[in-house]
Every structure is written in C-alpha cells, then in structure tokens.
Image (spheres, rainbow, N blue to C red):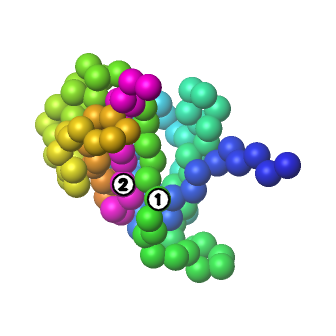
Amino acid sequence: MFNPGYILLYVQSPETSRHFYTPLLGCAPVEVSPTFVLFVLPGGLKLGLWARDGVEPAAPSVGGAELAMPVDRATLDAMYADWTGKGLPILQEPADMDFGRTFVACDPDGHRLRVFHPAPR
C-alpha cells in the first residue's frame, strides 16, 4: 500500500525557505543542509524543502498543487491579518466559495498556501 508521509517542495534556496516556513509552521526544522530542510509537523507529516538544482530527475517547474490547512473562522481571519502584516504575497483575498471561506498566499518560490474554513455540511 502506498501511504505518503512526505510533501517535498522544490525551492530555489532551502535557507530562504527555512526562514519563511519556520515562523509560519511554528516549529524548527529537524534537518538542515545546504540542499535540504526537513520539518516534522505535529501530526507527523513531513515537509521537505529541496534545492531544485539538485533534484534528480530534474524538478518540474512549479505545478498546480497547494498546501492547504482547514481552520475555524476566527483562525482564518487571524492568519490572514498576520500573513498580510508580515508581507506574504496574497493571491486570493478572503472569499466565500462553495467549499467554505478561504484565502491563498504564496511562499518565496510561488507555492500556494491555502487556508480555509469548511462550509457546514
């Protein structure tokens, strides 16, 4: 059975991405090298930031994927205020969509970071 436990993002600079993600995730990386940074999130999921120049086979350009996080409405509003205050690029202002309320920011490499409050079912 294929049971993924890692998300790997190809980045221009693992060091720049480490400084971006450390406060965003609220935890320090467990592994840091010139070409790779690894975070282990509280739920056990691992987030790796891999220097795109060293990926074999060669890394694709940024694709159509997002890191998404469900939260309650108050947390969504607080995160939006915090992220805009920190100057994160916002790709989508808070909006109500068919699946709930959401906004989208991006990291230094253009990876999309979606925060959403699911609509009641």
Q: Residues within 10 Å of mark 2 (few under 14, many from 20)?
A: many
Which image quarter is the C terminus in? top left
Is residue 67 found inside the magenta-colored segment of the image?
no
- Report whether 92 appears left or right of 75: left
Amino acid type of the residue that numbered disc 2 sits on in the rendered structure: Arg
Q: In the drawing, what numbered circle is on residue 11?
A: none
The location of residue 52, given as percent across then percent down, is: 51, 71
Tag 2 residue: 112
The location of residue 104, given as percent across then percent down, is: 29, 47
- Report whether 36 appears left or right of 84: right
Q: How far separated are the C-alphas under marks 1 and 2?
A: 7 Å
Tag 1 residue: 65
- Report whether 94 appears left or right of 20: left
Q: Quadrant of residue 31?
A: top right
User: Residue 6 or 118: which is nearer the viewer?
Assistant: 118
Is residue 118 found inside the magenta-colored segment of the image?
yes
| Residue drawn 64% across the image and 32% down it | 44
Please report the bounds of the magenta region as a residue range: 109-121
Q: How many marks?
A: 2
Q: Is residue 33 above or below residue 100?
A: below
Q: Is residue 5 above or below residue 82?
A: below
